[in-house]
């Protein structure tokens, strides 16, 4: 499991492509993620707050890749 953990906001997510970009202060410029990293219900949506585990690795123009994206209903209720 990755040692890099934070809370992030989904910038964009394509259910058709099964990928998107997440933003957090720890991943400046964005963190690329794929459906295979998502742990939780339903496709992600822009503006959704999630727990993010990441590693520094270039993917397209992004310098970070999600190793786990955890959907937590408590984050939705708390407003992030």
Image (cartoon, rainbow, N blue to C red):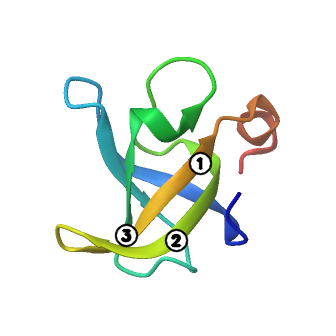
Other residues around mark 2 within 10 Å, as few (<14) / some (14–19) / many (≥20): some
Query: Which quadrant is the N terminus positioned in?
Result: bottom right
In the image, residue 38 above or below residue 62: above
Marks 1 and 3: which is nearer the front? 1
Q: State if disc 2 and disc 3 touch (CB < 8 Å).
A: no
In the image, residue 62 above or below residue 41: below
Work out how far the residue at label 1 is from the one at label 2, CA to CA, in angstroms: 10 Å
Circle 3: element type: loop
Measured as percent of width and height from the top left, residue 3 is found at 73, 71
Label for residue 68? 1
Other residues around mark 1 within 10 Å, as few (<14) / some (14–19) / many (≥20): many
Q: Residue at x 32, y 46 (%)?
A: 20
Other residues around mark 3 within 10 Å, as few (<14) / some (14–19) / many (≥20): many
Measured as percent of width and height from the top left, residue 63 is found at 34, 78
Mark with earlier residue (3, 2): 3
Left or right: 28 in relation to 40: left
Nearer the observer, 36 or 17: 36
Outermost residue toward the top in this view? 42
Label for residue 55? 2
Q: Residue at x 79, y 34 (%)?
A: 77
Please identify the quarter of the rendering in which residue 48 is found. top right
Work out how far the residue at label 1 is from the one at label 3, CA to CA, in angstroms: 15 Å
Q: State if disc 3 and disc 1 touch (CB < 8 Å).
A: no
Outermost residue toward the front in this view? 1
Q: Which residue is mark 3?
A: 30
Q: Is residue 13 visible?
A: no
């Amino acid at each position: 499991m990755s040692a890099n953990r934070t809370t992030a906001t989904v910038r964009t997510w394509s259910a058709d492509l099964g990928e998107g970009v997440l933003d957090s202060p720890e991943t400046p410029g964005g963190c690329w993620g794929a459906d295979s990293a998502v742990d939780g219900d339903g496709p992600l949506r822009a503006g959704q707050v999630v727990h993010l585990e990441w590693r520094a690795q270039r993917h397209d123009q992004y310098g970070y890749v999600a190793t786990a994206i955890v959907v937590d209903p408590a984050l939705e209720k708390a407003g992030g």
